[in-house]
Image: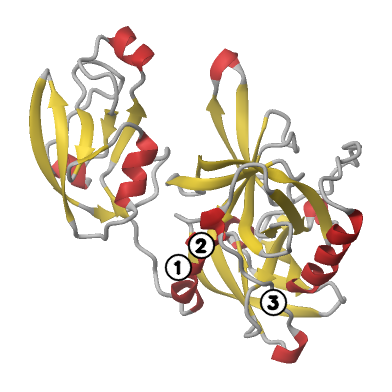
Amino acid sequence: AAIVSGAVSAGVTLAILRLQSRTNPQTVDLGSNVRITEDSAIIQVADRAAPAVATIITSRTGIGHGFGSGFLTTSDGYLVTNAHVVANATQIQVTFSDGKTAVGTVKGVSQSDDLAVVKVSVPGDQLHPLTVGNSDTLQVGETALAIGTPFGLADSFTAGIISGLNRSTTAPNGRALTGMIQTDAPINPGNSGGALLDGKGRLIGINDSIQSPVEGNVGIGFAIPINRAQKLLPSLETGVAIQHPWLGISGQTITTGTADQLGLSEKSGVLVVSVVPGAPASKAGLKADGTPSTNDDIITAIDGQATPTIESLTQYLDTKSVGDKVKLSITRGGQHISVTVTLGNFTAQPSATP
């Protein structure tokens, strides 16, 4: 599985593990899960959801087979999954819970969103889509139910809660993914592209990755909110390339501790650590040394809206389009200036950059 490592406090190194299984794993006893709803309610949800969720088996030259998951939201044969599930696949087999199989064809992929759509030619009356919920109204503590194919074990169903909202992680091509759902419903490699449901069985997210020091579930999983995905599916189904506005910087959220340590004049904002050569920010003259220092520009606002964090800057950019002009409020060497940037289209980078 592809792993993107990142350091956290106390010197602990964790990994964002894309949930796709490519090898035969050893069996691990994960212990018993705590039941958070009545058994009968979970059974009903599992029975209704299973026909809509499929196992995606991919073949790759020189790598072998991989397992992932996908699901239906309509009866027209389009399955939603993760981009990393079908990346570089030479052949795709889709298997439904009733044992029926079909050949899948990738119709559209967005690496920047880690989303893909796979088409299967199956009569509509044999397809049973999920009911789509509303991820915008989720609250921490709500029931979360996951269904997919962890380690190739089809139709696996697990229960937990929504552990956090508006989390940040990274897409396979290095773009920052913000607004992610965090859950402790146990998910593992092979769950990628599977459904995250609420307590009534409504689709609220697409299981994407886990954060773990041991490349296995430790109760921190991330899912793409379904409301975000729904906006992109029409383009993915027709193969239209999805563009994301881009500044072309690597930045660091300024905290009081960071400001004191580096001697910065601002106590919040985004410190521009590096600027991608030839990117929109570079063309607009943004400055950075390549390592955090007082010589770096600090972005304090965009179009008059405060940007106290990288996440807030990225979220605002996601409301814009490629080619739009934005005005950045910059602190440079203690001076306050405005810089206008024409947004470009995101290109893959070795690290997440807004």
Is the residue 75 above or below the residue 204 in the image? below
Tell me the tag on residue 129: 3
Q: Residue at x 16, y 40 (%)?
A: 328
Kindly identify which residue carries mark 1. 231
Q: Nearer the viewer, residue 28 or 224?
A: 224
Q: Quadrant of residue 14?
A: top right
Q: Nearer the viewer, residue 1 or 160?
A: 160
Q: Is residue 278 visible?
A: no
Rendering coords of residue 261 (x, y %): 33, 8
Kindly identify which residue carries mark 2. 227
Rendering coords of residue 45 (x, y %): 80, 64
Q: For the residues marked 2 and 1, what is the alpha-carbon distance in whole angstroms?
A: 7 Å
The secondary structure type at the circle numbered 2 is helix
Q: What color scheme is it?
A: secondary structure
Is the residue 301 above or below the residue 102 in the image? above
Q: Residue at x 36, y 27 (%)?
A: 253
Q: Is residue 138 visible?
A: yes
Q: In what quadrant of the picture does the C terminus appear?
A: top left
So how many labels did they put on this image? Answer: 3
Three-letter amino acid code at disc 1? Lys
The secondary structure type at the circle numbered 1 is helix
In the figure, is residue 116 to the left or right of 342?
Answer: right
Is the residue 149 above or below the residue 241 in the image? above
Give the crowd class for mark 1: few <14, some 14-19, many >=20 residues within 10 Å.
few
Q: Are marks 2 and 1 in contact (CB under 8 Å)?
A: yes
- Pick whichever of labels 3 and 2 is earlier in the sequence: 3
Q: For the residues marked 1 and 3, what is the alpha-carbon distance in whole angstroms?
A: 18 Å
Three-letter amino acid code at disc 2? Asn
